[in-house]
Structures are given as structure tokens and as C-alpha cells.
Amino acid sequence: MLVAAGCSSDSGSGDDAQKNESAAPGPTVSESASTPTVQPAAYATLPKACSVLSKKTLDELIPKGSKSGKSGKLDEPKQRGNCNWTSLDNNGVKGSQFRWLNVALLRFDSDARGTGEEQAHDYFQKQVSAAQTAEGALDSKSAPVSGTGDEATAVRYGLKKKEGSFKQQTVVARVENVVVTLDYNGAGLAGEKTPDPATLLKAAEKATKEAVAAVAAANGDGGAASAGSPDPATSSKAPSSSKAPSASPSKSASKSASPSQSAAKKN
């Protein structure tokens, strides 16, 4: 809207001057100058969560359930995806080996809340904090993971359930404006020995790196997956500061802070 300004006068010349000044356009402020520009998000899409891991990797992590992948009910193309697999290797009277794997992907768009990368970093920290403070966690340990996206952290702990002792591994990674959360746990049931947590963690970290690479590849960025986080010490130099943690490490993947208005309707 143009605003005309003039000085009042009792003389006729003053009236003419006011009319001429009123007719002339006043200074305007462009929208680009008044509205701050937000950096567009680097990644615009997501791969299907059930397709981010190769058959070879699934056979290693879920030996009796590599084809059991089930998509999440809250999946939304390009915004969020979730897939879980279950494996039960029954050894008869010797017991059974149980494995469960879940991969969750969440993409953030740049908007009034900040850049997609900043929002993804905030959510990354929430997921890590949620895993570190999981209810019932025993002997929890966490460490940064190098060579996986822009930042990554692995959290592992034990869980006592009526079925047996479970070993939980949660690896959270951020690549650009996408967060990958991988949960992997295992247990020896009915007399079978408890799986080695170090072996489970190594497998989980490898799978997370593969999932991050799939996200980058889906966006035509083949080198981003391994180019980030060369040194765990640099992970603190992220886009923005953290916020409060979400409710739980496994449920938060599908009940997260929404990256867009359309995703919010799903929650």
C-alpha cells in the first residue's frame, strides 16, 4: 500500500503542492527486503523405508525374517517412512534367537521455524536423548559414530523382559535435512544364550550407514552419506542447539515433531 504524506497550508499554492505531492508515489519496501530468506532444504524426497537396506544386510540382521518388512501406518511419501522386521530362529529344545529391526526416516522442510538442516539437527538430538533416557534401560552407553552422514550417535543398553534379556542398539544419524533412526535388538529365548551386544552394535552401525546412503542416493547425492562426520568431535558444530527429548527411543520415530503441516495432520 502506498502512503501519501504532505504538509497542510492555508494558501492556495500550498494546496497545489499537496495535490502534486499526493499524486507522486511514495517509497515502498520490497517483500524480499522485509521477509527473511530461509535456505531451501537440501533433500526433497525420501526412499521407501523398507527398501533402504539390501537383502544381504537384512539376512545378516534378520536371518529368519528378511522378507517380513512392514511399513508404518503414518508413512507419508517424501516426508516420513518407517519399516520393521522380526526374526525368530527356533532351535527346538535349545531355545530361540530373536531379532527385531526398525528403520525410521524423517525429512524436514525449511520454513518459518528454520532451515530443514537446523530442524533435523534438533530432532537428531531429541532422538539421541530419548534413547539415552529410555525407560528400563540397563548399563546404557553412547558414543558418536564417524563416517555416517553429517552426525551420528549410537546408544546401547540392556532390557529385562519376561521373555528374557534383550540387548538394544539405537543408532541415530542426520544427513542434511533427514534423520535416520535405526533400532535393533536381540535376545536369546528359552535357554538360548544372549547375543553379544558388540556384534549387534556393529551390525546396527553398518545398516545405518547403508540407510543414510540410500537417502542420499534418492536425492541424487551419492557422496554425502560417507562424506559427513569424519571426526566425532566435530559433531557438536551442528546447525542449532537441542531441545527437550521425546517420549521414547522406539516410539518417537513415528510420533515425532512434524516436519510439515501435512505431516502434522497424521500425528
Image (cartoon, rainbow, N blue to C red):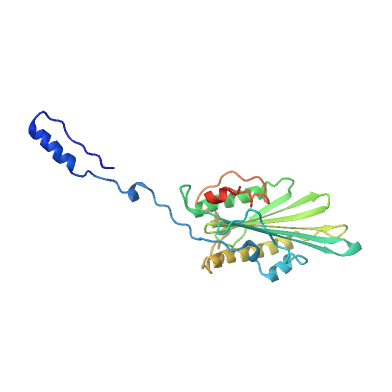
Q: How many marks?
A: 0
User: Whole-percent x and y of residue 155?
Assistant: 67, 54
Q: Residue at x 77, y 50 (%)?
A: 159
Instruction: Residue at the far bottom: name it.
Output: 56
38 to 8, vertically: above or below: below
Foreground of the two, 233 or 182: 182
Foreground of the two, 238 or 53: 53
Q: Residue at x 69, y 70 (%)?
A: 55
**Where is the N terminus found, in terms of image quarters?**
top left
Q: Residue at x 71, y 67 (%)?
A: 58
User: Whole-percent x and y of residue 25?
Assistant: 21, 45
Q: Is residue 4 visible?
A: yes
User: Whole-percent x and y of residue 115?
Assistant: 47, 52
Q: Residue 57 lies in what quarter of the image?
A: bottom right
Foreground of the two, 19 or 99: 19
Q: Residue at x 51, y 60 (%)?
A: 44
